[in-house]
Image (tube, helix red, strand yellow):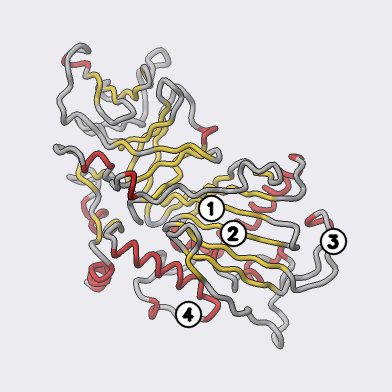
């Protein structure tokens, strides 16, 4: 898991004006709420007073608000925090008294796009951050966007990303695609190449499948010839994967999987599906149903993959030419390792929640001191990560 990237936090439709929501990302608890203007704010969830959860349970009754003038209220002692992370009021010293400077929590940059609230979880200044991925088709009238679908999976997000990049599993995992690998005399995965994507921060590839004829009941059109389905995609940062599926040269799906690493064994996927055919909204439901069916086929396999995390060395798996996209993704992870952005999961789990509370460092930590909650431990570089794995 890495700091210094954009992560999905919650669907826009699931965030009300008057109620904060508690979310776990990168192993750390966050609180998300809307300020007085309706803008989303994301903070570290741990109150710096006595460890109350800003997004936790509320027992004061329906007449006592959780959000006051756009500030989230700690349910333990009523401390009020603004979207900038600073405590604005402490009831025990009087609402007209100024809170101490240390009464602050980390606040993260937020963008709300595609029906999702995203937060930049890291301390990079704005000019150094990778931008939020641009979904070029989203506002194009020739493309239709399904409502964002969320999928909860019980495995590590890197395994999920690699599964989405894998051109060799479809015939075995997804019989509903119409493919088959049972012709042992002719079956193989065609060669393909990878490259860095146009946006930077990731890789890209396209692959030609030996596809069956296209049936009208599946896609609304027919195709009598086989072998002309192109599909592929790439990654953006460590946690976003893009898939392009072109059943014909004129027909296309563009699928965006924004993955939220909850911890090393749980992930929530925010799935945005775009299409340039069957644009009538009546097709949204059936397409969602088909995507859920395909996702379940992946989940049934992936929940039994072992080890749960991707190996630190490619020599711990027997990789084939068909795994070229997976190797390219891991090469990008190596770059993020060398930048010093990977969370030290072992050290985090050893100390977190015992005598230590952790927070993902925010950009404000580069501008001010006296932070109460400790920043998550990081692995310095790839070499250090390998040494840690050995020990």
Residue 319: mark in rendering: 4
Task: State which mark lies toward you, 4 or 2.
Answer: 2
Q: From this view, report whether residue 116 is shown above or below residue 223.
A: above
Helix, strand or loop at disc 2? Answer: strand
Horizontal and vertical percent position of residue 100: 15, 25
Q: Earlier in the sequence, mark 3 or mark 1?
A: 3
Say which residue appears at 62% left-offset and 41% top-offset: 139
Q: In front of the other: label 3 or label 4?
A: 3
Q: How far apart are marks 4 and 1 (CA)?
A: 24 Å
**Residue 257, numbered circle:** 1
Q: Nearer the viewer, residue 307 or 115?
A: 115
Q: In which quarter of the image is the C terminus?
A: bottom left
Q: Name the residue under label 3.
A: 222
Residue 44 location, x and y as percent? 30, 37
Question: Mark 3 falls on what kind of element?
Answer: loop
Residues under labels 3 and 1: Cα distance? 28 Å
Residue closer to the observer: 361 or 20:
361
Label 3 close to label 4 by CB (< 8 Å)? no
Picture coordinates of residue 49, whole percent (x, y): 19, 29
Q: Which comes before the other along the chain, label 4 or label 1?
A: 1
Residue tagged by mark 2? 243
Disc 1 packing (10 Å; few <14; some 14–19; many ≥20):
many
Q: Residue 141 carries which label?
A: none
Viewer-closest of 50 and 257: 257
Residue at 31% across, 36% down: 107
Q: Distance between the residues labelled 4 and 2?
A: 22 Å
């Amino acid at each position: 898991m890495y700091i210094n990237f954009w992560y999905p936090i919650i669907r826009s439709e699931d965030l009300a004006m008057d109620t904060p929501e508690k979310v776990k990302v990168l192993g750390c608890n966050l609180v998300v709420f809307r300020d007085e203007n309706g803008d989303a704010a994301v903070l570290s969830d741990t109150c710096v007073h006595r460890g109350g959860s800003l997004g936790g349970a509320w027992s004061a009754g329906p007449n006592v608000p959780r959000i006051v003038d756009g500030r989230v209220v700690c349910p333990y002692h009523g401390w009020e925090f603004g979207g900038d992370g600073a405590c604005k009021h402490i009831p025990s010293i009087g609402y007209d008294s100024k809170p101490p400077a240390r009464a602050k929590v980390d606040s993260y940059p937020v963008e709300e796009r595609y029906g999702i609230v995203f937060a930049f979880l890291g301390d990079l200044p704005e000019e150094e951050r990778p931008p939020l991925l641009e979904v070029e088709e989203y506002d194009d009238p020739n493309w239709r966007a399904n409502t964002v679908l969320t999928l909860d999976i019980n495995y590590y997000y890197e395994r999920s990303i690699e599964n989405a990049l894998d051109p060799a599993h479809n015939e075995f995992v997804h019989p509903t695609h119409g493919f088959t690998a049972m012709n042992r005399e002719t079956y193989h995965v065609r060669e393909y190449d990878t490259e860095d994507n146009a946006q930077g921060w990731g890789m890209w590839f396209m692959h030609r499948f030996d596809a069956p004829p296209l049936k009208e009941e599946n896609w609304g059109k027919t195709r009598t010839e086989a072998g002309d389905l192109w599909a592929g995609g790439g990654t953006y940062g460590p946690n976003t994967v893009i898939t392009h599926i072109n059943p014909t040269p004129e027909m296309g799906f563009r699928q965006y999987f924004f993955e939220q690493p909850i911890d090393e064994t749980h992930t929530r996927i925010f799935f945005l599906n775009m299409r340039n055919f069957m644009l009538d909204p009546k097709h949204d439901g059936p397409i969602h149903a088909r995507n859920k069916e395909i996702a379940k086929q992946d989940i049934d396999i992936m929940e039994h993959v072992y080890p749960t995390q991707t190996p630190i060395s490619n020599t711990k798996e027997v990789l084939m030419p068909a795994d070229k996209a997976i190797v390219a993704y891991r090469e990008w992870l190596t770059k993020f390792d060398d930048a010093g952005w990977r969370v030290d999961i072992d050290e985090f789990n050893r100390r977190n929640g015992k005598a230590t509370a952790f927070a993902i460092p925010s950009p404000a930590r580069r501008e001010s001191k006296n932070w109460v909650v400790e920043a998550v431990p990081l692995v310095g570089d790839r070499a250090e990560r390998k040494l840690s794995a050995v020990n």
